[in-house]
């Protein structure tokens, strides 16, 4: 057995390389052809039922508006009922023929069961499930003295999507529906202070890639990996090391630095277009894909860059990181940050 493994160690790399050289040109040509056909004959969601979790703000809110413009019927869930009502009213104005809301916390399995049941009870079907609810953090791993305080990150970002998807699966199979998975570019980025958040988004990618194999063509799955997009996360809303949600825009400046923050409405439009085409993956903005290329080809460079820009000397305040100093020195904040994230105010009940 050891001899066989040693033989494979020798022959597998060159055989794989030359096989890919032969396989990739026709494969890419075929994919381009399929993409063109999908763009011409994309799905019409008028009258179809879409459930969006985390719909009270950010990308989830603008996804509701984008689906509404296309005539979809909407079920919107989040923890903030007042904010949800405002989104629902706007969605009706944008053209949705029927919108229901439900207050729910996706980290709780019974809430996930209920939001699917209420959607199907009201509409009689479910066509698209958008797993969007998420929370982030901005604290060093070793500063979390009680590590269980970070459990809500995984409970919401990962398990919330797991629960909701499992309950929605039979209904989505019946409708030959679609699942939209809101992962993040942080699924491949070694971003300091976002360790468990990055892990939760990586877990989503792995889970839903595996589900593609298990489910086959019965349900379409689009995995979305946004970069920096206007939302409460880029406004500076984080889970602290003490397990409390806080808004800290100075710390946001450390984490986002001089990176352009994209429009939530443009991101939502790209997501819906990609989903209706049946795309398997979407990174928005598209240029952010290059960070993945760098990660694959020279991971040490990416790690060194993050450490140099985002870390401080032991004991120093995180807000002294070079990433924030660069932003402050260049005065780029007003140019590259949308007005919607300039204020620390977030939606409340």
Image (tube, grey):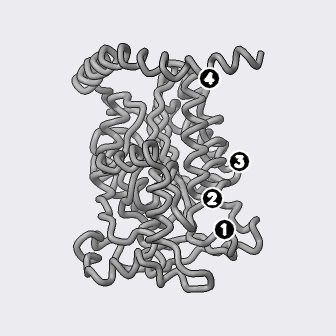
**Hey, which quadrant is residue 250 in on the image?**
bottom left
Q: Position of residue 238 (x, y in %)?
A: 55, 71
Query: Does any portion of residue 101 appear in the rendered image?
Result: no
Which residue corresponds to mark 3?
109
Q: Position of residue 81 (x, y in %)?
A: 52, 63
Q: Residues within 10 Å of mark 1 (few under 14, many from 20)?
A: some
Q: Return the residue nearer the eye: 50 or 218.
A: 218
User: Could you give the CA–CA distance between mark 3 and mark 4, rounded to whole angstroms?
Assistant: 45 Å
Q: Nearer the viewer, mark 1 or mark 3?
A: 1
Which residue corresponds to mark 2?
196
Q: Nearer the viewer, mark 2 or mark 4?
A: 4
The mark nearer the N terminus, 2 or 4, is 4
User: Could you give the CA–CA distance between mark 1 and mark 2, rounded to whole angstroms?
Assistant: 8 Å
Q: Residues within 10 Å of mark 2 (few under 14, many from 20)?
A: many
Q: Nearer the viewer, mark 1 or mark 2?
A: 1
Which residue corresponds to mark 4?
9
User: Could you give the CA–CA distance between mark 2 and mark 4, rounded to whole angstroms?
Assistant: 34 Å
Look at the numbered disc 3 and give the secondary structure of its residue.
Answer: helix
Look at the numbered disc 4 and give the secondary structure of its residue.
Answer: helix
Q: Residues within 10 Å of mark 3 (few under 14, many from 20)?
A: some
User: Could you give the CA–CA distance between mark 2 and mark 3, rounded to whole angstroms?
Assistant: 20 Å
Q: Nearer the viewer, mark 2 or mark 3?
A: 2
Which residue corresponds to mark 1?
141
Image quarter hosting the N terminus: top right
Q: Return the residue nearer the eye: 322 or 118.
A: 322
The mark nearer the N terminus, 1 or 4, is 4
Disc 3 vs disc 4: Cβ atoms closer than 8 Å?
A: no
Disc 1 vs disc 4: Cβ atoms closer than 8 Å?
A: no
User: Could you give the CA–CA distance between mark 1 and mark 3, rounded to whole angstroms?
Assistant: 27 Å
In this rendering, would 1 be left or right of 197? Answer: right
Disc 1 vs disc 3: Cβ atoms closer than 8 Å?
A: no
Q: Is residue 247 above or below residue 156?
A: below
């Amino acid at each position: 057995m050891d001899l066989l493994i040693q033989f494979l160690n020798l022959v597998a790399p060159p055989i794989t390389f030359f096989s890919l050289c032969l396989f990739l040109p026709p494969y890419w040509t075929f994919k381009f052809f399929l993409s063109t056909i999908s763009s011409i004959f994309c799905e019409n969601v008028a009258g179809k039922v879409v459930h969006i979790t985390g719909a009270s703000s950010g990308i989830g809110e603008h996804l509701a508006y984008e689906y509404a413009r296309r005539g979809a019927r909407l079920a919107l869930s989040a923890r903030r009922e007042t904010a949800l009502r405002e989104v629902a009213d706007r969605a009706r104005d944008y053209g949705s023929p029927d919108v229901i809301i439900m207050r729910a916390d996706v980290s709780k399995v019974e809430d996930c069961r209920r939001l699917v049941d209420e959607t199907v009870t009201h509409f009689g079907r479910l066509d698209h499930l958008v797993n969007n609810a998420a929370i982030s953090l901005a604290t060093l791993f070793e500063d979390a003295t009680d590590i269980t305080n970070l459990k809500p990150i995984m409970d919401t970002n990962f398990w919330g999507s797991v629960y909701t998807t499992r309950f929605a699966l039979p209904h989505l199979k019946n409708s030959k529906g679609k699942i939209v998975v809101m992962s993040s570019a942080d699924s491949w980025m070694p971003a300091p202070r976002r360790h468990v958040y990055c892990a939760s988004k990586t877990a989503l990618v792995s889970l839903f890639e595996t589900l593609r194999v298990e489910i086959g063509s019965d349900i379409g799955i689009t995995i979305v990996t946004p970069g920096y997009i206007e939302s409460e996360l880029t406004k500076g809303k984080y889970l602290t090391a003490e397990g409390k949600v806080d808004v800290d825009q100075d710390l946001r400046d450390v984490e986002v630095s001089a990176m352009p923050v994209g429009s939530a409405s443009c991101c939502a439009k790209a997501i819906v277009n990609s989903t209706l085409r049946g795309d398997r993956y979407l990174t928005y903005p598209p240029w952010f894909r290059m960070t993945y290329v760098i990660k694959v080809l020279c991971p040490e460079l990416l790690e060194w860059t993050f450490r140099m820009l985002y870390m401080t000397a032991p004991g120093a305040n995180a807000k002294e990181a070079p990433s924030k100093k660069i932003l402050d020195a260049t005065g780029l904040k007003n140019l590259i940050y949308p007005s919607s994230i300039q204020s620390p105010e977030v939606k409340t009940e």
